[in-house]
Image: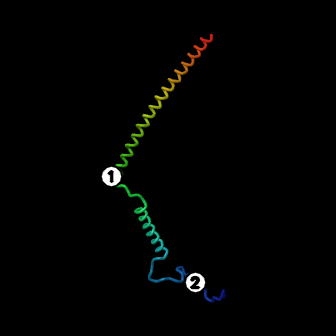
Amino acid sequence: MELFGRNKPVVFDPYGSSRRSGFPIPRWLIILMLGIVIGAAGLFYAEENDLPPRLTPAESERLQSYAAQLEGERQRLQAALDKATGDARVAADAAAKQIAATRSENEKLTAALGA
């Protein structure tokens, strides 16, 4: 049967019609490896030129000890603030009681003067 002017059967060629002999690495593998190399080079370039420098172990230890010192200072100041807030509340309650007592005494004296 002749279909579109062909007399011979179509043979499946899994490697395509342009099979190169003597070069055993597939083109897709070369492109993949090239992409990996370019990506690694770009990452190295970005780390060296765009990111801040890395800390040395001594600098890192110094920074961690400073952070621990600041955390202790923060906790100490928070405790002092809590104590001052509690003292202020006690003083405010005492002042409110004194104001209430003064008002009631003032009302009694006003009622005594009016009578």
- Mark 2 lies on a secondary structure that is loop
Task: Check disc 1: other Cα within 10 Å, few if <14, some if 14-19, many if 20+.
Answer: few
Q: Look at the image and name its color scheme.
A: rainbow
- Mark 1 lies on a secondary structure that is helix
Q: Position of residue 48 (x, y in %)?
A: 40, 62
Identify residue for label 2: 11
Identify residue for label 1: 58
Which residue shows up at 61% across the image and 13% down it?
A: 111
Q: Which quarter of the picture shows residue 24?
A: bottom left
Which residue shows up at 54% across the image and 79% down it?
A: 14
Q: Is residue 16 placed above or below 82 in the rendered structure? A: below
**Quadrant location of the C terminus in the rendered image:** top right
Q: Earlier in the sequence, mark 2 or mark 1?
A: 2
Most foreground residue, 88 or 15: 88
From the viewer's perspective, tell me whether residue 113 is left or right of residue 23: right
Q: Amino acid at mark 1?
A: Ala
Q: Position of residue 12 (x, y in %)?
A: 57, 81
Q: Amino acid at mark 2?
A: Val
Most foreground residue, 79 or 99: 99
Most foreground residue, 14 or 63: 63
State how far apart marks 2 and 1 are (Cα). Answer: 70 Å
Q: Is residue 110 placed above or below 7 in the rendered structure? A: above
